[in-house]
Amino acid sequence: MEPRILKKHTPYILVSAAVPGEVDGLRSRMEASSQGSAGFAGQLLSGRIRETEVMLLVTGPGLVNTACALAAAIESRRPGLIIQTGCAGAFKASGLRIGDIGVATQEIDVQLGLESGTGDHFSMIRDLPFPVLKIDNAEYFNRYPVDAQWTDVAYHHLGRVFAATDIRVQKGPFVTVSTITATNHRAEHLYGAYGAIMEQMEGSAAAHVAAGYGISFVEIRCAANHVGYRDRKNWDLPLAFKNSSMAVYEFIQTIKL
């Protein structure tokens, strides 16, 4: 595949993750040059992965940490592409297994909106009566876009890379939560309502910030567990950290600045 060329004014790729372990695999492959901070919690490491300039940003977990650190990093130096990565819970109904890769086609903040008014805790929330972000003629309520072209590049390239392995690659909507799902009933509701393939805690904030600044956004994660009843002995965070970093590393190879 010929690398897709970013516009000349876009100098580097910003890779964002909640915790250090989620980018350790990238850090070990990177020729590091400098460290810094972004906002009150974010930690930056800049360097190169082969010929591509990359900054790794560890934001801290959750929506607020992610939004603040990303905005601070962008205000300091605008990237050409933001990649959100790390571990996630996979919805069993999606067919994803622990260790498999998900590529987001949309980010949905499932806890931002209006209750349905039916009294059913599991009913799908409605849009707020006002957008939380308006850019030109586009209004965003609780769903945020990814860059469709980059997402297709990532999905197809990673499918080829992992074709000879037991790692599956799938694309679909991701849901962002502030309260981790811990019941099978809730997991079934989220899958049925949104068709989501993965649940995590940072993606909608990153996608919101990227949309606000007009920066292309892609999200690539690896399943560490299945969404629903929590049984930590069945989780595999080290595998998710390893595979998500490997997937992002491979995707970066398709990009030429």
Image (cartoon, grey):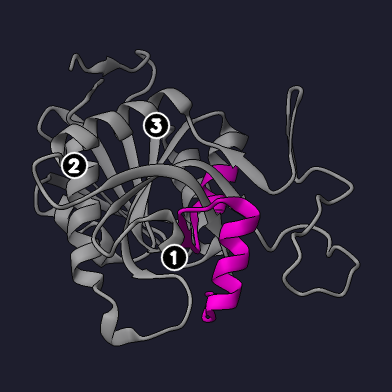
| Circles 2, 1 touching at the beta carbon (< 8 Å) | no
Dot placed on the residue nearer the N-terminal end, 3 or 1: 1
Asked if residue 203 is among those painted magenta in the image, a careful observer would answer: yes
Query: Of the numbered discs in the image, which one, if any, rests on residue 41?
Result: 1
Graded by Cα atoms within 10 Å as few (under 14), some (14 to 19) or many (20 or more), the crowding at tag 1 reads some
Q: Secondary structure at mark 1?
A: loop
State the quadrant of the N terminus: top left
Residue 198 rendering spot, x and y as whole percentages: 45, 57
Determine the CA span between mark 2 and mark 1. 24 Å
Does residue 22 appear left or right of residue 183 in this picture?
left
Residue 207 image-quadrant placement = top right
Which one is nearer the viewer's eye here, 113 or 223? 223
Which one is nearer the viewer's eye here, 25 or 108? 108
Residue identified by numbered label 2:
249
Which one is nearer the viewer's eye here, 147 or 17? 147
State the quadrant of the C terminus: top left
Residue identified by numbered label 3:
151
Dot placed on the residue nearer the N-terminal end, 2 or 1: 1
Residue 23 image-quadrant placement = bottom left
Does residue 138 appear left or right of residue 163 in this picture?
right
Please tell me whether mark 3 or mark 2 is closer to you in this view. Answer: 3
Q: Which residues make up the magenta segment?
A: 180-208
